[in-house]
Image (cartoon, coloured by chain):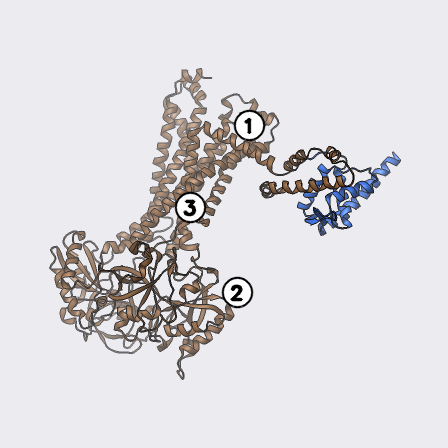
Amino acid sequence: MPKADHLQGSLEILVLKVLRRGPNNGYAIATCIEQTSDEVLRVEEGSLYPALHRMTESGLLKAEWRNSEAGRRARYYELTAKGRKRLEEEEKRWHSVTAAVAKVLRTV
Amino acid sequence: MSLWSRLFRTFRSERHIEEIEEELQYHLAMKAQDGLDPRAARVRFGNPSRLKEDTRAQGALVWLESLLRDARYGFRQLRRTPILTLAVVLSLALGIGANSAIFSLVDAALLKPLPVKDPQALRLLEWSTNQGWPGDLCLWLTGDTTGSPTGPLRGSSIAPRVYRRLAAHPQGFASLIGFSDPGMVGVAFGSRPAEQFQLEYVSANFFESLGVPPRLGRAFSAEDDRVGQPPLVLISDRLWRSRFGGREDVFGQRLRINNVPVQIVGVAPPGFFGLRIGDWVDLYAPLAAQVALSPRVKLDKSLGEADTYWWVRLMGRLKPDISEQHAIGQVSALFRNLVVPEGATIPPGKIPKLITGPGSRGFDPIGTDKAQALWILLLLVGLILLIVCANVANLLLSRAVVRRRESAVCLALGAGSFRLLRQYLVESITLAVAGGVLGLFLSHVLAEAIHSFIRADLNIGGFDLHIDVRILGYTALISLLTVLLFGLAPAWQLARAGVNDALKAHGRTFAVGRLRLPRVLVVLQIGLSLTVLIAAGLLGRSLTNLETMDIGFDRSNLIYVSVNPWSAGYKPEQVPQYIDRLRERLAAIPGVLKVAGIQERPLSGGSNMTTVNIPGQPYREDDAHGVLINSVSDGLFETLGIPLLAGRTFRPGDMVSKSDAVIVDELFARRFFPRQNPLGQQFGTGPKTTERYRIVGVVRNSRYSSLREAPHPTMYFPSSTQLWPGFNLNFVIRSGIPTRQLAGGIRRAAAAVDPSVPVIEIKTQTALIDHLLLTDRLLSILSSAFGILALVLSAIGLIGLLAYVVARRTNEIGIRMALGASQSNVVHLILKDSLWLVGAGIAAGLPGAYLVGRLLKHTLFHLQPADPLTAVLSLGILGVVAALATWLPARRAARIDPMTALREE
């Protein structure tokens, strides 16, 4: 079974968001998430790669081997139209959920 | 996730893992480059092999592994009950095998396309007119004609020269090929006596356009297809192997066809049998070679390459980018220009145009009666499979009941009911696969046996029956279907059984229950058996009706001899003398009572027709004015034993070419000369009013062309007036001794007259009739076999169920007997149970039998689908078998010793 961690639910939306800026490889995606979140969010690679493959298989991403800037072969992921749509939905849902949670935390 | 994507992922998981591996290596390398210690990266990352495991878990591996565990467990279970397993696998093999066998025949005869390149692009081309026969454009026509002589008419063949000019400009078609109907020729290899083989005349582009290049040598060229060229042949792979031992140097071999030396240029690819399914052509010759090879064409100048002799069938290959309508429109326009001579005046309705028909299955496919027979067999054998399923379901149910406690324990310990269901399904699939594989072998043996039965009698090439993807697919499909049918029963039972129910139930006694599902299944079996039984009974009685019908003469001890002096080079003026000499010789054979000559043998499948033109009556070319004709020698009616009703029969004096004497049958006399004395009446044949013929005698009706169709008016000419060059001559012998003792004497007599004239065939009248009834006999034999199989299976089902009931009620029966019940009371108990089952089965089976009978309506001869005698007979047989099947368990019940039975508790 995939290891459970606190990012489990939100990893997908983060990956989609990062890839929104353009195709990238797994390492860069992980680094980007970590740096943007000021190291608050740590991406477990054991979750990232299975997630990437799962998403590729369900058609949210497409993958391709390319030469990276570092000159080595790396697998690059790119958003598909379906992925882009999913990102929009997920973002909307995320905002409404976090807003709702914040409201509960404030008022109760 | 669907089953498919799971399996798919398992198969590609190796590559998948490799990819992840490489990706991870990149990841680690980048981390190291970014200044992190690679070891630290690894630590945070965790164990890569552990990661791999995680990825795997996500795939189908775990799922598959647990499935394998189920299968292993299932095997163990099946091994624990070997007899039950064997019974299940054998009955499945029988059911599946019989179904696949019939299917392989149906597929080969009715469904499979020709073994040529892209058969779906092939179209048969036929001509059609709106107002009947195309006038003087066509004097001789071979192949198929359908329609009416005055209304819309379709014909299959055109003249060879017209064909060649069409083929030179196929227009919208990629190519147009031409070919004759296959016909028998005498073939002599070296100095051996001639044998009969099928030969087909084909166009030069035949093999290339069909995409079946010769396996050896070459195909024909346009040069070869010219009158005057030395005749060439291409032989089938089958002939090459059987007569030339598959040798490469076949091209130098000496071969004579109809006494004409020919040269072999090539060998057709294996499995190619020509363009008629069910036929097997062994020799192919160019169209133009007919002039050199056919004795009939050699003798008659109006045949051969004449534009009024239409004998070439047409097939076109469509171009992918041109529509069928467009292509045929172009070719039809060209055809019209070619076929209508310059300045000729032909009514527009009689000018033929070309139309297309499906061509992927060749031409002249299996007749509708044979097709229907095959579909009926497939239906009956399908019912057998249902009976098998019911049987297997019951066997498995009885085991499932035993295992119910075990299942309940599993459920109580937390196993998902889905897992348990899957367990049963895995076992069912295992059984079905075993039954299917065994059934496949069985089916091949069975199909070959049926096939050789057909072939021996039909003298046809036969079908291509090798096990291919289609047959494999069908077998797999019905195996899967049986799994669904018989595997569902135990699963259903399981789903109904609550955990508490089963666990609370006490040991052995919990299963005494009503056994509702097993009972339903046995009732179903009995019903289906009755259906198959009644169908078999109907088909058998129909065959008997056909076999015993009055054919108008005595069929026993009649034997026909067919010879062909034309193929030995006889001229028309030499033939009458030959006929006289052979007839004399035949009459001198000891045991022969009478000998006569006859053009078409009655009930041999061949017959000739013409239209009569009676003075004072309007002439029409329709069926009502069509009459069957035959030409016979003097003494024919005496030899066959057809009674004379008025006038006289033929005398030797009538056997001159100018004779006007004809003899007609009662039907003829009644239809054309009602309320008149037919004797002395004069009339002609064909459209011109003449008084060519004069009736000298009227004979009783007899069967000539068909047993099934109503008798048709028939007239007989003196054979001297109708000498048809090229055709076989037939003699009929009335024998005083068993006909099988005559063959040797007949061959010696023929050899004594002229050893170069081949004896084509020696056949008794009963053999001819058997041939005519082949389809009916095949149906009767196979349906009877299915009926017996159905009975045996149902009997097993009934015995099994009753025995089970007895075993489960041993205790109760013991108590009853201890309380004073007699043995007959106990037997009565079981009998009542059985009577209910059989009665319900009959009630379920009778409507089914009626429906099947309705389907057989057109196959049955002089028999109603709801024939009471057949129903009574079938019910009787079923009753006897059911009584036997009841007697065994009832006897066991009666012999129960109350003390033993009670002590067991």
C-alpha gap between disc 3 and disc 2: 35 Å
Tell me the kind of residue under disc 1: Ser
Using the image, name the chain to which the residue with label 2 belongs.
B
Identify residue for label 1: B407
Residue B608 visible? yes
* Chain depicted in brown: B
Instruction: Identify the image quadrant of the N terminus of chain B.
Output: top right
C-alpha gap between disc 1 and disc 2: 61 Å
Residue B834, quarter of the rendered image: top left
Tell me the kind of residue under disc 2: Pro
Going by the picture, which residue comes out furthest to the bottom? B343
Identify residue for label 2: B320
Q: Position of residue B865 (x, y in %)?
A: 38, 50
Q: Chain A appears in which tint? A: blue
Mark 3 is surrounded, within 10 Å at the Cα level, by few (under 14), some (14 to 19) or many (20 or more) other residues, namely: many
Identify residue for label 3: B100
Check disc 1 and report its element: helix, strand or loop: helix
Check disc 3 and report its element: helix, strand or loop: helix
Mark 1 is surrounded, within 10 Å at the Cα level, by few (under 14), some (14 to 19) or many (20 or more) other residues, namely: many
